Amino acid sequence: MFTDRTPRAFLDSGVIARLAAVPLVSRRPMVGGVSGRHASPHRGSSVEFAEYRKYVPGDDLRRLDWRVYGRTDRHYVKEYEADTNLRCCLVVDSSGSMGYGSTGETRLDYARRLAGTLGFLACRQGDAVGISCVGDRVVRHLPPRRNPAHLRLVLDALEQLRPQGPTRLPEVLHELAETVRQRALIVIVSDLFADPEQLAGSFGHLRFRKHDVAVFHLLDPRELAFDFRRPTRFLDMEGGGPLFADPLEIADRYAAALAAYLGAVQRIMLEQGVDYHRTTLDESSERVLARFLVSRAAGKGLR
Amino acid sequence: MTFLQPWLLFALPLVALPVVIHLFNQRRFQTVEWAAMRFLVAARSLAAGMTRLRQWLIMLLRMLAVAAAVLAVSRPLAHGWLAAAGGDRAAAIVLLDRSPSMSQVSRGGGESKLATARRQAAAALETLGVGRVVLIDGATCRPVELATPRALEQVPEAEPAAAAADLPRMLRAACTELSAARTAAGTVWICSDQRANDWRVADPAWPAIRDTLARLPQGVRITLLGYDEPPAGDLAVRVGRAVLEPRGREWDLRLDITLRGNVAGAGRVPVQIELGSARSSLEVELTGVETVVAGHVIPVDVALLVGADAADTGRERPPPGGWGRVSIPADTNPANDEFFFTFGPPADRRSLIVAEEGTGADESRRILEIAAGIPPEKFLRADVQTLPPADVTDVALADVSLVLWQAALPGGPVAETIGRFVAGGGQVVFLPPAAAGVPADPAAAPATVAGLGWGTWSEHDPPLRPTTWRADEGLLAATQDGTSLPVGDVEVRRSRGIVGEGTPLAMLSDGRPLLVRASSDRGGIHFLATTPAARDSDLAARGVVLYSLVQRAITAGLAAGGRLRQVDAGGLLAGVDEQAGLPRGDTGGGTAWQRLAGAAATSTEVGLHAGVYAADGRLAAVNRPAAEDNADMVTEPQLATLFQGLSFTRLERQTGSGGLVDEVWRLFLAAVVLALAVEGVLCLPRRSLAAPARLAAATREMPA
């Protein structure tokens, strides 16, 4: 099926094999070009009964329900749900802050693993996969395509991604909401270091465009623990000025600001119906993805 | 603030150590790349004011701890006044008032003012590390160098004495000492209960003392340890008069006993009278501040009494009289609860009038003979003799109490004879000779006696009257019941100037002295500026003043110079041997006073302690001066005036209170501990270090 045999450091075939047992499904009806395993807003030819409809001239007579005609002497056509494929847009934050990591790998490395594995799984089940690498702008954009060759480009794009520049995630998400024309599963992998209120607007925009939005919020354990002891000069990875602080002095207020931010993000995600996954970098990416896939599979069938 | 090790204060710049460490710590920061800058920025802006305040507080507390530690090791001393006392460590002169009033203890008992003063002064000087301590006690006014400050509590010169203190004289001695030791820094500590009679505010020597102290090159700091607690619950007993009066073939002892003090609700006080081995007592109902029992009569077996004295004194010749002791129960001041007295058959009141024949002084001489020849009591005998100046010899002056000298001032051997007479307790009143005052032989006749001499005659028309006179002491003092003598009624028509320095006892309205007491002697020489002759004054017409003057002088001469003496402690008995050039104590064959009663004292302290002494057939009862029973204090304004222009600090102390100088390094050590404890509390992190870990764990469990 796949022509790409290039080894990718961020892809683990064992993980992919284990996760392949759980399908990647959309929480919302998708408008796909071909048949797939995702719900569609249109009637189709699946085995899942949808509704009866009065016969109109031109309908395929094979879909006429003769039993109903026999009982009621009326002509009804039996309609079935349509299954289609989805358009999976991977949005990977490539700002400077994604280069941070205290566990041995950077946040971007972790994002590569998540996005790459998801792209691989989506492509494997026949879905279209595209990628948008965003920083202060859309650094690179590959629209969703179904063919495996396109997946190679996506993986190449992930591999070549370098963290740099500031974050303008809200603006970029607005741009993507307008760019992606059809309904799509938009998977955002980012540290979300932006104003929560602005993020709320962006996610609202995506929701308005009927996209199924999933977010992997990547946080480093040290960002949560803030266990510095000595006076420290903090260099902003996104190009801002340095900041000198005694961690012992500001640890409490740092924790308060962090908790307030996380609470706000959590609230916004709930309000906007975003599939939100807060992830720390010391967690296993396989476990994170499994949780993601299982939670979505459990909600399959909603149309 | 005073420090015992002030050089350690050079370590005070260590106060900046926390700041330096802080700056150094800031320099050894680490640099990390950080993504979550938005939380750091928020943390810095969140309640930054409080954090900054806390940081400043922590820094301040650290600096405070260092400063307190440095101050603690510098051994600070308590009390702000010690800044004045602690600066000079080379030498200190302690003026110790050891008069009977300093034996006062507080009502609750405990130690006396004197013991407290000695203890506190010794501890203070020891703590201050004073190298040289000179003690000048109030009784002798002699400087005694002490080996260590603690010796102040051991030397006999600091023991309680019956003599009153003489602050002006003590300060003069201190001035002399300070002048002699120019290199020593001048710190004068005065330990006194501020009794007015000890301080003698009216003494004309005060201005000179002030000037001397102010001019000392090394500068003098005076610290007064004032123990001015009022003498509550103190009753003093005194015998005013003790005379033997004939009663047929027997003799009665007639005593005037005075009880003085402020004892609320005392009621009746038992008074015990001891005459040798015989004791009697009487109950006295207190009627006020002063209660007088006049003429208390005790029958006396004179022969038995004299025999008992002879047995006690051993080799002494039996005195022509006896001695006794009056005492009351002990109260807050035991020093004035007993009084010694001598008594005997009344001595003849012998007077000598020295006048030159044919100089127009006959009228005056006759008046003086009358004034001296009439005894104040009918059972007394008075004897007056008149001699020309040249015939005045030791023999002629034997048993004479008063010399009324109306002739040219004596010189040569006669002056020496008069000097010995005065040193032996005799009284001399010089009246202006009628002549112009130019002696026949200028070489033989000195211009002055005891620093006083005659000036020129002045006529007064209209006559002058005395406007001021000393009614508290001296020959013109008020009577025992407080009535003043009518000195102001005397008219002086002619007077002769008195030159030299003395204590004026009466002043005329134009400022000339009428009666002056020589200051160089012990009160035995007086100069009267006029004569009782009618053309000079109306002293004869208004005889009360002249008669009182003459009779009081005779009484004083009898008390001090007779065979039975009543002497103030520190007075004539203590000074007689010194002035007469006689050996003291038992060291020679001269006057050796043997103690018959009273507190034991070293030979150098004879005459300073209350008791009865015998020598050469004479008996002397030594007691505290009468003024000691007067509780008047020197007031603050008076003190300010006395030490005006000098570096003077008064420290009020309580009897039995703690030390003067307290090292307070413990307080500073406590400040160190407190500062460090508060700093530790402030340094505690606002939340535990495990909290972020819990937050991280909770994040993982958070449902998506």
Image (cartoon, rainbow, N blue to C red):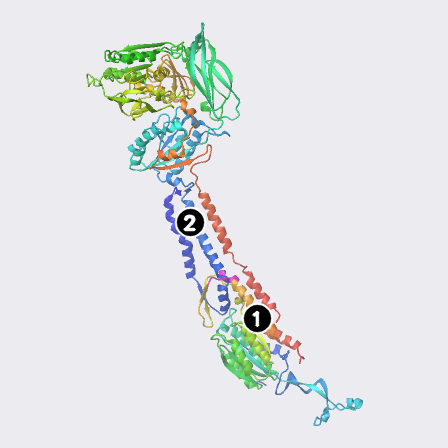
The residue carrying pointer 2 sits among few (fewer than 14), some (14 to 19) or many (20 or more) residues within 10 Å by Cα, namely: many
User: How many marks can you see?
Assistant: 2
What type is the residue that disc 2 sits on? Ala
Q: Nearer the viewer, residue A271 or B523?
A: B523
- Tell whether position A250 is magenta: yes
Q: Nearer the viewer, residue A19 or A168?
A: A168
Q: Are marks 1 and 2 in contact (CB under 8 Å)?
A: no
**Residue segment shown in magenta:** A245-252
Q: Quadrant of residue A53?
A: bottom right
* Residue A67 higher or lower than B87, as above or below: below
Provide the secondary structure element on which disc 1 rests: helix
Q: Chain of mark 2?
A: B
Name the residue tied to disc 1: A265
Q: Is the C terminus of chain B in the top left, top right, bottom left or bottom right quadrant? A: bottom right
- Tell whether position B461 is magenta: no
Q: Which mark is residue B67?
A: 2
**What secondary structure do most residues of the magenta stretch adopt?**
helix
Q: Is the N terminus of chain B in the top left, top right, bottom left or bottom right quadrant? A: top left
Instruction: Say whether residue B505 is visible.
Output: no
Q: CA distance from mark 1 to mark 2?
A: 51 Å
Provide the secondary structure element on which disc 2 rests: helix
Left or right, B227 with reference to B356: right
